Amino acid sequence: MSYHIVDMTDPAEPEPVVLAKHAKNLLRFLHLLPARMSSHDDTRSTIVFFAVCGLDVLNSLHLISPELRKDIIDWTYGGLVTPRDHERQCGGFMGCRAMVPKTEDAEVLESMRAYQWGHLAITYTSIAVLVTLGDDLSRLNRQSIVRGVAAVQHEDGSFSASIDGSENDMRFVYCAATICHMLDCWEGVNKDAMFEFIMRSLRYDYGFSQGLEGEAHGGTTFCALAALELSEQLHRLDEVTVERIKRWLVFRQMDGFQGRPNKPVDTCYSFWIGAALCILNSFELTDYAQNREYIMSTENNLIGGFAKWPKSTPDPFHTYLGLCGLAFIGEPGLNAVMPSLNISMAAYKHLNQLHERWKTNNNGLTHELTQLKLTVGSSAEAGTKTTSSSSLISAQ
């Protein structure tokens, strides 16, 4: 599908976005986190995602020095879990480095493996960071990670975040779809069951809920639609259903966007609702000027960053999604965003190049194996003919 960005048509001179301050704000989070964010230690990879991908949308990846870029890539790979043959299929990236103690004690390291497993949200954001920084993903065992994704799929088609101790809902359906799409591998994942779970979560008002019998929500509606697109199943929605989903999404705009009926607007829904409408090729149905005005009302023009509400503290999450919301309306100075993967179109282009390289290598390997089989077969046949015509007496 196309991701057409329509330019803003309001003739009034809009208040400029303080792009440089937002870039400096996000870069700061790559070096130092405030004490109030200590509770997010086990999801630090998501903060790196918001900061790195935010800098990409801001056309400011050059602010990340080559040394820091290498450090981020190496640190990200430090959370990779690759199970052994006899261990549970729990490949992926884990959230907390506390499970990787700094010790050379083999017994301690071995015992800790029982607590190391991939987490779908962390795996998604980690791969997205690597792609955004231009990594070739050569250190990943793609099949191992996707086996880990398949291992956390439930019979109803939903996914848990990890092999143990997690709820299963639409958030992790989305994360599973992003991982499989980015790694270009769906081995073992039941896409039909995924589709059925998503459709059972479609509510009477035509938004999608987090799970069965829940309330329709903007974030989970995005997750549902993005998962369908990434798994190449969006076409299975009939036209009437699509139009009703569009209606539910468009009705979420007050000035900014709300996540549910009768709830206050919030900066992040400029992405969740906006991206969902982009997936359905209907973002032009929204009021660009009102959307921009609300996002800008949450901007901190002193230190940079966007907040959830006006006069609130900015954070990496709302800063990144606010920038994405502005990118959808064609804000000058911002890179275009690929809605369903929530990365820049530049990063998405790099990902597609990796897919082409993998396909070429796979085709080359397949050709080599075919030639090898033909060569071995010819040699065996020749050997058989030589033996049968030999004058030597066979062993009795």
Image: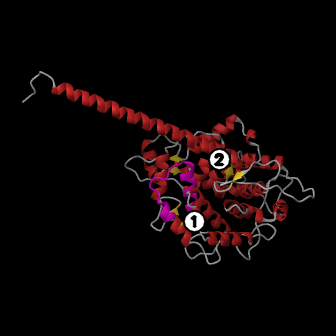
Boundaries of the magenta span: 173-194
Q: Is residue 114 above or below residue 298?
A: above
Instruction: Based on the picture, tell me whether residue 77 belongs to the magenta stretch.
Output: no
Q: Where is residue 32 in the image (x, y as percent from the top left)?
A: 72, 47
Residue hosting label 1:
170
Q: Where is residue 394 in the image (x, y as percent from the top left)?
A: 10, 27
Q: Say which amino acid is labelled 1.
A: Met
Q: Is 351 placed left or right of 362 in the picture?
A: right
Q: Residue furthest top?
A: 391
Q: Does 185 appear in magenta?
A: yes
Residue 348 tag number: 2
Query: Where, quadrant-wise, is the C terminus in this rendering?
Result: top left
Q: Which residue is drawn at 62% across and 63% down?
A: 225
The CA distance from mark 2 to mark 1 is 23 Å
Whether residue 92 sits left or right of residue 337 in the image: it is: left
Q: Which residue lies furthest to the right in this view?
A: 12
Label total for image: 2
Residue visible at 71% across and 64% down in the picture: 273
Q: Is the magenta stretch mostly helix, strand or loop?
A: helix
